[in-house]
Amino acid sequence: MTEKQTYIAVGLTILLVIAQGQLYAQQSLPSSSIKGCGIPIAVNTVPIPDASRFAGRWYKYRQSNVNTTNQLLDHTPLNRTGLSFSTTSATGMVIRIEQYNNPNDTACVHRISVGLFGVNGQIPTKSFSSSDNFNPATTDFNLLYLDIDSFYVTYLCRGANYKTGMCDRPGFHVITRQRPDQMTADQLKAIDDIVDSILAPFCFSAVDVQQQMFTDSKPFCTPVDFSATGCAQSYIMAEMNEINNVSSN
């Protein structure tokens, strides 16, 4: 190839790369995304047609930047649609969470959350954890995917950048009906494939969300009586009284 031909070939290659970039920029992405990496603070959510179907035990399969052992989540619907910390009219839900923070821990971490499972897929919650002396913490979860018989995926923004509209510290949770360590490799791959497709527009994938540990070598934690904790005297006394009543049944 002559020097002139080399220049022509390089020029054509550059034009091809530019054209491919312009084509990508014209591709339609989900309206909750942007043309680039990262996840917005506000995202499109999937609807919750019947929050009562969340009732029962679930397991934390994957969670961002956290490694827990034997984390289970018991969901119990409340007999009300409104809670004092949110004006949203939605089904109230108690979620009792039990876990070990790492495989070597002997002490369990007990957490209880009361949330509003909105039809629009937004889930504002107020939580109390034994690891934080039962001080209340408010979190807004967003439902990204729901297969009520298999698993669901939520997103929360732990660090919002309001100048860019993006989330600097996103958190994802993959929660399954079945214990992950009792699933087959094919079942787990099917879940991960869906998680990949959900997170791909934001340049994330399942491998960015840590797989949690389950083992029979450690007993699952026994729920505590939350009526004996300081959170029973919190400023959402009415909800906590109802939580304690539901949790004791």
Image (cartoon, rainbow, N blue to C red):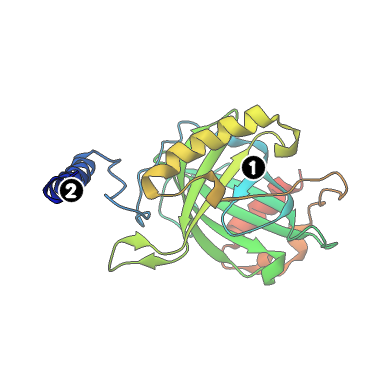
In the rendered view, tell whether residue 127 sits above or below residue 28: below
Q: Can residue 78 be seen in this view?
A: no
Tell me residue 174's x, y (percent). 57, 44
Residue neighbourhood size for the residue with mark 1, other residues' Cα within 10 Å, grouped as few (<14), some (14–19), many (≥20): many
Does residue 29 sit above or below 70 in this rendering? above
In the image, what residue type sits under mark 2?
Thr
For residue 201, side relative to residue 132 (left or right): left
Tell me the tag on residue 6.
Answer: 2
Residue 150: horizontal and vertical position, in percent?
60, 30
Q: In this view, which residue lies farthest toward the front?
A: 2
| Quadrant holding the C terminus | top right
Kindly tell me whether residue 249 is visible in this rendering: yes
On residue 211, which mark appears?
A: none
> How far, Cα to Cα, is label 1 from label 2?
66 Å
Which one is nearer the viewer's eye here, 108 or 227? 108
Residue linked to disc 1: 75
Horizontal side of residue 4 vs 143, given as left or right: left
Label 1 is placed on what type of residue?
A: His
The residue depicted at 68 percent of the width and 58 percent of the height is 111
Query: Helix, strand, or loop for circle 1?
Result: strand
Q: Which residue is drawn at 52% across and 55% down?
A: 125
Is residue 197 or residue 231 the one in the foreground? Answer: 197
Residue 184 at what x, y percent from top left?
A: 70, 29
The quadrant holding residue 103 is bottom right
User: Quadrant of the image for the N terminus?
Assistant: top left
- Which one is in front, 243 or 177? 177
Q: Which residue is drawn at 21% across and 42% down?
A: 20
At x 41% / y 43%, what residue is drawn? 200
Residue 241: x and y, percent? 66, 56
Report the mark closest to the observer, 1 or 2: 2
